[in-house]
Amino acid sequence: MPAIDPADVVAQAAGFPADLADALARDLDLTPEEYVARSEAAVAAAEVVESLGDQGVDVLDSRMDGSELVVNVAAQDDVPVVESAGAVAEVGEPAPKPDYSGIVLKPLADLVGGQGYTYATLNGSQRVNHVCSVAFNGVSRSTGQKQFLTAGHCLTSGRQDGGTLFEARQSAAGGAVTRGAAIGMPIESSFRFGGGVDAGLVATAPGWTPRSLVSTWGGSTGAVGQGNPVAITQTSPGIVGAPVCKSGRTTGWTCGEILELNFPTPVYNGGTGTPVIVNLTLTSACMLEGDSGSAAVIGNAGFGVGTAGSFAGSCNTASQPNAISAFFPLVTTDGSASVASALPDWQLQTGSPYGNDWSPLGNLEKASSSLKTTTFSGWTFDPDSANPVTIHVYVGGSYLTGAWGGIFEAKLPRPDVAAALPGAGGNRGFSIALPTKPGAVQYCLYAINIGAGGNTDLGCRTVASPTGAPFGNFESAQLNGTTVSLSGWAIDPDAAASIPVHVYVNGGWGGAFTASAPRPDVAAAYPDYGSAHGFVIPAVKVPVGTSTVCVYGLDVGGPVINSQLGCRTVSTGSGPPKGTIDSVTSAPGSIAVAGWALDPDTDAPVDVHVYVDNGWGGLTSASVSRPDVGRVFPGYGDKHGYSLTFKAVAGNHTVCAYAINLGPGVGNPQLGCRAVSVPGGDPFGNFEQVTRSGTKVTVQGWTIDPDTTGPLEVHFYVDTGWGGIVTANANRADVGRVYPAYGAQHGFAGTVNAPAGAKQVCAYAINVGSGTSNPKLGCIPIK
């Protein structure tokens, strides 16, 4: 909260009413300039205290010490926050305050604050029954009706003439009152006295032009309005220690300091009886009977409506040092009763007090921020002058709380303004450029008045410096064999420096690079950042097949939020798998198939499904080394051969193989089909020898079943009777050489029973496959 030097407000204080200047000197020992400086500091301080509460600071108490804001906080951690707002921080409860609970307050009827009014005459005479005053002018938000604010207790006395209120005329503050013109009609439903509230509204009579002024009594002589008025430009809830002044019918201008805010106060009608409770702000300014309803101000800020006081007979503070006066506040920040909460439809009239507003007109149209420059644009002109309007800029808050940002002129061409406002002229635009500050910063712009009127608040805008995640574009990916070259650009909005970019291939690491190549086109689009933001990466390794390449811009400022600049798909080859069946061979009871297969989208092995006569044959992986395939398809490796052996019955068969697709190709292509015959039929062999030994004979020979490599049983019959079984599983190398597919284990040698007198032995091979009989291998006589 910047300090306000009284020397800076000399012009503002120069128009003060003489009797207000006298009251300031008499009651507060202040010059008008010191009063304005302290008042503006107090109004700003109240805003700062409210802001501290919004930020979570536990504010125990606050007060003005001259023009310095002092804030009591509960915790040491809140001290830096308070000090950053330009206030003095004190930890712990404030010093004990005076106890005002025992003071008797009574409503001060018969009052004039701004324009006095009276209820009626008695039996047509000019005797005035009851006098109150206009506090502030305003309007109904919902209907637009002109209404003025007064004290709620002003309706408690009887009135005549159908409720009409009349102008109260007097020659000086405190002088006799006579009735003038009708001034308005009370809106009875709005009048409240008690329950925390003392306020009411009056519908302004035709013929009166409401002004945003607090009138005075012309230096305590003459009618209302003959002296200089105080313009009301805003409201303030006030703060302890703030200077406050009021203008009343009885005492004119008196001033004091705020002693207590939002104090639930018992007010006694006439000083006795049962009190009503009103939420009041207590001050040391003097009010006497006749001052009730007076308008209280802090500088140009409307503050409250005069309600009650304890001054008796005079404003002599020496004889009554503890006397106080109390005002019902226009606004509060703690939720306690106020005019704003009790009469929410009523809006205080502020701004130009005289129908025609000769203050500058204008509009702050746009506020934007780049890395280096924060820009504001709009238009403004002053109806009093053909000269360009100067614009004052404050950074970090209003003119009361912000830092000085500079002075500028509105003199750029704006033909649209000239067309809409022919008297304005064409060169009324402004474009203001300030160095960008980090973070979110509030900027407030004011058009400085020329001649009549006042300065115009063009508005406050909060503008954030550029921040956030990097942005850019991954523009191209060009494949060259098994490497890919990448290009694009990337910027981190927090910094003009080149930033790193990281590359990922199929989700795996691809490399780190820097986006520092010249890109004039990027610089043209983002001039604050320069051109060193391109990336050209000549070679990133990619596997064979189809790959997804993604590029990320790395955040170098603020929170780390890396951004994906884009992803692109590259492919060394794509489509469905390819390959072939090299061979299909048969063996007893089985078929063997071999070949190769690969998917151009990947160097990983593919599955091969084999079907026999349209039925399932088996599954294998094409992962067997095939150097010949590797030479033809470099980069894919040689692990793409397959071989599968599966059982098969004897006979003719068709074998087909299919490669199962892994990539984006469509379908599982057939690698080929081959015809093959699996051997089968009845066993064959040779019964070679019989030798007798007593009642037994030894038999020898060999036999094979074409359907299997396994051994067979050989059944023997002696003459016509059963002789026995011998298994043909003995090694017969000679047989193995002749029938290598079946092996050598097909010989038989064993004994069978042969009773005396038996003449021959016959051998039969027992079929195990597709054959249809158990063929006789032969018969040999027994010798």
Image (cartoon, rainbow, N blue to C red):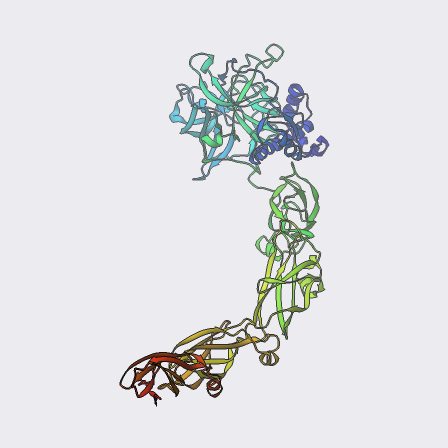
The quadrant of the picture occupied by the C terminus is bottom left
Q: Position of residue 360 (x, y in %)?
A: 62, 44
Numbered disc total: 0
Q: Nearer the viewer, residue 725 or 159?
A: 725
The quadrant of the picture occupied by the N terminus is top right
Q: Position of residue 292 (x, y in %)?
A: 51, 21
Query: Can you see residue 387?
Result: no
Query: Can you see residue 484?
Result: yes
- On screen, residue 4 versus residue 341, left or right, reads right
* Residue at the extreme left of the image, as rendered: 720
Q: Nearer the viewer, residue 58 or 36?
A: 58
Q: Position of residue 68 (x, y in %)?
A: 67, 28
Q: Residue at x 61, y 31 (%)?
A: 43
- On screen, residue 361 versus residue 126, left or right, reads right
* Residue at the extreme top of the image, as rendered: 319
Q: Residue at x 67, y 47 (%)?
A: 438
Q: Is residue 126 above or below residue 298?
A: above
Which image quarter: residue 228? top right
Q: Nearer the viewer, residue 38 or 217?
A: 38
Q: Residue at x 67, y 25 (%)?
A: 66
Which image quarter: residue 587? bottom left
Q: Nearer the viewer, residue 381 or 473?
A: 473
Q: Position of residue 330 (x, y in %)?
A: 52, 30
Q: Is residue 403 above or below residue 655?
A: above
- On screen, residue 670 versus residue 549, left or right, reads left
Q: Residue at x 45, y 11 (%)?
A: 272
Q: Is residue 250 above or below residue 477?
A: above
- On screen, residue 578 versus residue 38, left or right, reads left
